[in-house]
Image (cartoon, grey):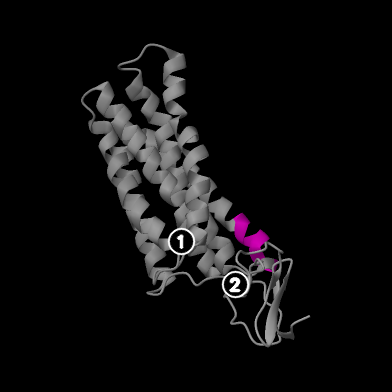
Amino acid sequence: MKKTWWLGFGFFSISLTWSLYNAFVPYFLETFISSVAVIGFLMTLDNYVAFFLQPYIGRLSDRTDTRFGKRMPYLIAGMPLSALFVSLLPFHRNLAALVAFMLLLNLSMAVFRSPTIALMPDITPEPKRTRANGIINFMGGVAAIIAFALGSRLFKTNEAAPFLFSGLVLLLSLGILLWKSGKSGIPSPPGRRRKKNRPGKWSSTARPSSFSSPSFSGSYPIRGWRPFSPFTEKTIWGFRRTNLPFP
């Protein structure tokens, strides 16, 4: 479970960043916008981005295979960009620049949020996932407390200080995750590696085929059969049986 505590820094940085963002960005928007409804709409941009982008990124990370693992490439790409854009937020000069930084931050945060959450079940055995999930959420809660307790003091000192602090936490969290995941990255979950097909064994990697033969001028889409001579291959509901005599 020690590794779960270290992986919790990913969710820690996400929770800290969003807490500071939601607390102080409306203050910047009030400088240019008097409508509360418009400010509220702009503050929900992250929800629209998450709705369309996060499911796609999560599914894409499931199919990713690199020397850094399945999830880490998205953290390596998204966390430094998020650190950059959150640090630039207080240095806007006009409304267009502020909204642009907000949108870029939302996009970069969406790149690594789903893979960060998926790190825990990737390395945690199923019986321990409930406890691990509690640890991850505990880290997020601690981050929110720190953001609201320390953020106001930093903001009174300098308006840019909370955002620079958030950017630093994002970079430190990425460093911790890279350090603890090792050079080869987080390993793929056990039992998901594709097994080689063996003659006479059932395999779920086969795909249903259509009937075709050189002796026919066309192909006949009889699903599940494909002749060979003197043996054939039979596919039923996506499963394949090899070395069967032609029926």
Quadrant of the image containing the N terminus: bottom right
Q: Amino acid at mark 1?
A: Arg
Residue beneath the point at 45% across and 35% down: 46
The quarter in which the C terminus is drawn is: bottom right
- The residue where tag 2 is placed is 192
Residue found 63% across the figure and 73% down from its top: 213
Helix, strand or loop: magenta stretch: helix
Q: In the picture, residue 132 is in which quadrant? A: bottom right
Q: Residue at x 68, y 88 (%)?
A: 230
* Labels 2 & 1 near each other (Cβ < 8 A): no
Q: Please, is residue 84 above or below residue 155 in the view?
A: below
Residue situated in front as seen by the camera: 7 or 209: 209
Q: Is residue 167 magenta?
A: no
Task: From this view, report whether residue 29 is shown above or below residue 204.
Answer: above
Tell me the tag on residue 202.
none
Left or right: where 234 falls relative to 55: right
Going by the numbered disc 2, the residue's amino acid type is Arg
- Marks 2 and 1, Cα distance to the nearest angstrom? 15 Å
Q: Residues within 10 Å of mark 1 (few under 14, many from 20)?
A: many
In the rendered image, residue 78, in percent from the top left (x then y), is placed at 36, 51
Residue 142, image x, y percentages: 51, 48
Per the rendered image, the range of residues in magenta is 127-134
Residue at the extreme top of the image, as rendered: 34
Residue 164 picture quarter: top left
For label 1, the residue is: 71
Q: Secondary structure at mark 2?
A: loop
Q: Where is residue 118 shown, x and y percent of the image?
A: 54, 58
Residue 215, percent across and down?
62, 74
Q: Is residue 132 magenta?
A: yes
